[in-house]
Image (spheres, rainbow, N blue to C red):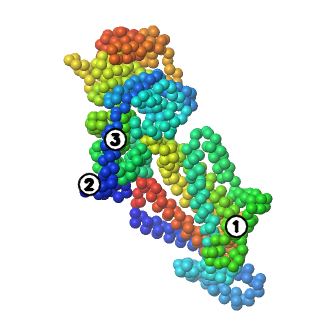
Amino acid sequence: MVAVASPRFGQRPASPATLAELEKLTERLARKPAAHLLVDGLSIGYSTLRGRFHAVEDVSFEVPAGTNLGLVGESGCGKSTVVKTLMGLQPEATQVSGRALLDGQNILGLDETALRDVRWKRMSLITQSAMNSLDPVYCIGDQISEAILAHEPVSKATAWARAEQMFALVGLPAGRLYEFPHMFSGGMRQRAVIAMALALNAGLLLADEPTTALDPIMQSQIMTRIRGIHAHLRCSMILVTHDIAVVAETCENIVVMYAGKVAESGPTAEVLESPLHPYTMGLKNAFPRLPERGAPRQPLISIPGVVPNLLLPPAGCRFASRCPFATEVCHRVTPPVVQVGAQRAACHHTDRAAEFRVAAARPETWRTMRGAV
Amino acid sequence: MRAYIFRRLAQSVLVVWAVTTIMFFMFRVMPADPTAILLERGLTDEARQALLEQWGLTGSLWDQYIAYLGNILTGDFGSSFLYRKPVWEVLTPLIINTLWIAVPGLLLGAALGAAIGTAVGWAKRGGKLERSGIFLATIIRGVPNFVIGIALLTIFSSTLGWFPSFGMGDPGETTGFARYMTLDFLHHLALPLIAVIIYFMPENLLLMRSGVVENRTEDYIELVRAKGVPQRRVAWHAARNSMLPLITWLFPALAETIAGIVVIEIVFSWPGVGRELVLAVTRQDYPLAQAAFFLLAVMIVIANLAADLIYGKLDPRVVYK
Ligand SMILES: Nc1ncnc2c1ncn2[C@@H]1O[C@H](COP(=O)(O)OP(=O)(O)OP(=O)(O)O)[C@@H](O)[C@H]1O
Ligand code: SF4
Ligand SMILES: [Mg+2]
């Protein structure tokens, strides 16, 4: 007799009906195709006490079905804002414009009822703050099965059995389903949230810094697990992270955001191999794990200065105040988006990118900011 | 858990003992002679002495105290001076009357307050529902409850004539439980019951609202929304978490709540324990007053104990040590 987790009583021999239903559910979910997402001209404006500002401006990217997209950028550049808005979770007074086509359907501006059909069924979320993302008064099993029961016409027993499968997938013992969030360590909560995100095998997985709150060993364990699971489930994924190395290993495409705008985007290999935007160059050289092929180990650089205040965005290029290659035009005119092959960058001087790349590898370039080369 | 309950029970006994002791000295210190009211009825000195002995009012204070504690332990509160009957005989029907307005009144008040508070807390910030909800609740909470009672009486009894203005009605021939199942009784019950609900609801409503407002922006609510469950279910998560502070307020506030019910009983001349307690004190009917106070003390202690245990049931993070 197969024992599965069941609501209330702990592991129980499963009834044949439950097993049959579970098998049907698993089969049904496994048939879900990976989703395709096209974000086009997405702008998001928050209202605050100090005024309205655009946390995200004119962001466009595409996630082809079955691929991963890495979304990187400094803290506060609007990554979570993009992810939350895709889920329809932006605060009430937020202004959203542009389109986000999930398998051809625009999911921006859907009402709560219509959103229910998208959320978790077609698109699920691994939240940035898994520590606080679980309801403290319900046991984990209840919270996972709640998501399943909201979308699949199965019995509670089957939902719990499915939750146990997901727990196994992320390496948590079934007995832990009966425990409450406060009894979990940070890493376990993170895994519980991942298990929840996988429960319905949604076509698109939004992972907002799934490992930031964890220690480095846990981080790499969780990332390895996410990669493994992902290869197994073959859904599409947007992975928000600060870690360029993780993107290099995990994502086909990359979007580099700076102060609410896309600085550069394109296939990860190309963008990291030959970045066109000075910010990408800085970001790349700020990470220890990607020495240029054949070249001696690169010294680490750090980008001086701070992100501009979005309430009063500067004229011209938003990176100009920190860019070692900025010229007069950069401070005056918003840079155009230049396409080179599959790569796109918003910079006035993409034609000098090769020259910049050499200079950007030297830490002095970033230390002595004279505003021009 | 068991050790915890045991310790709390021991504490409760201690509290009840303290209350009874205070009560003992309070009534002895009061200047008036309890037999004085009976003197008007022409009591001889011997008869008076006999009564004093019967009530345990002779001998040294210490002897009286020991006798008093002994009596309480055996549940014997003596006889009412006024009714000349054992106090429990006097109190039992009154307790039942009080329960008729208190239990449904407080339950409905808490439930309605919690439900409306959730709706108001979940409503759009600064919207009509939120503003009118807070406005009404704050106003009602600010009004003394005898004013609520008098307003109800003025509107529904004097002006509209829909409900009787006082008392519990004439039991007529019916006795026992059937007495409470008459339309006449329910007719009399309506206004005081509504008064208790209106009196008790606003605090629940406001507490629940602020809890929901606080919880609705928590990260876990965001994840519940992301799961695509119905809005009601999302609001329920916020409400469920907001119940914790509500419980911690609800039970300790019981003493105050009981005082409020006493006032309502008096306004509506509802023959309950509270009203009788006030009457007994003014009539210096100490045995009756003592028994009624004792009852209240026990109820409040039990309520606090219940609050702890219910809280533990609602919040998995609580451990009893
Ligand atoms: N609810 C909100 N109301 C107003 N401003 C907000 C709100 N949420 C975020 N912001 C602002 O929007 C900007 C982008 O925030 P966001 O959380 O998207 O950054 P992020 O890229 O995810 O950063 P991190 O890497 O630290 O998570 C920040 O300036 C932030 O202060
Ligand atoms: S536009 Fe000018 S300031 Fe902006 S990144 Fe390019 S070179 Fe630097
Ligand atoms: Mg973020």
Q: Amino acid at mark 1?
A: His
Mark found first going from the N terminus, 3 or 2 = 2
- Of badges 3 and 2, the one in the foreground is 3
Q: Amino acid at mark 2?
A: Val
The spot of residue A350 in percent (x, y) is 37, 12
Could you say which is closer to the camera, residue A39 or residue B220? A39
The residue depicted at 46 percent of the width and 69 percent of the height is B10
Picture quadrant of residue B158: bottom right
Residue B273 in sight from this viewpoint: no
The spot of residue B191 in percent (x, y) is 69, 62
Instruction: Find disc 2 in the rendering and name its residue.
Output: A2
**Which chain does the numbered disc 1 sit on?**
B
The N terminus of chain B: image quadrant: bottom left
Whether label 3 lies within 8 Å of ligand 3 gets the answer no
Image position of B231 (left or right of A303): right
**Which chain does the numbered disc 2 sit on?**
A
Q: Secondary structure at mark 3?
A: helix
The C terminus of chain B: image quadrant: bottom left
The residue depicted at 72 percent of the width and 89 percent of the height is B45
Residue A64 in sight from this viewpoint: yes
Q: CA distance from mark 2 to mark 1?
A: 62 Å
The spot of residue A113 in percent (x, y) is 50, 39
Instruction: Find disc 3 in the rendering and name its residue.
Output: A29
The residue depicted at 55 percent of the width and 30 percent of the height is A47
Q: Secondary structure at mark 1?
A: helix
Instruction: Find disc 1 in the rendering and name its residue.
Output: B188
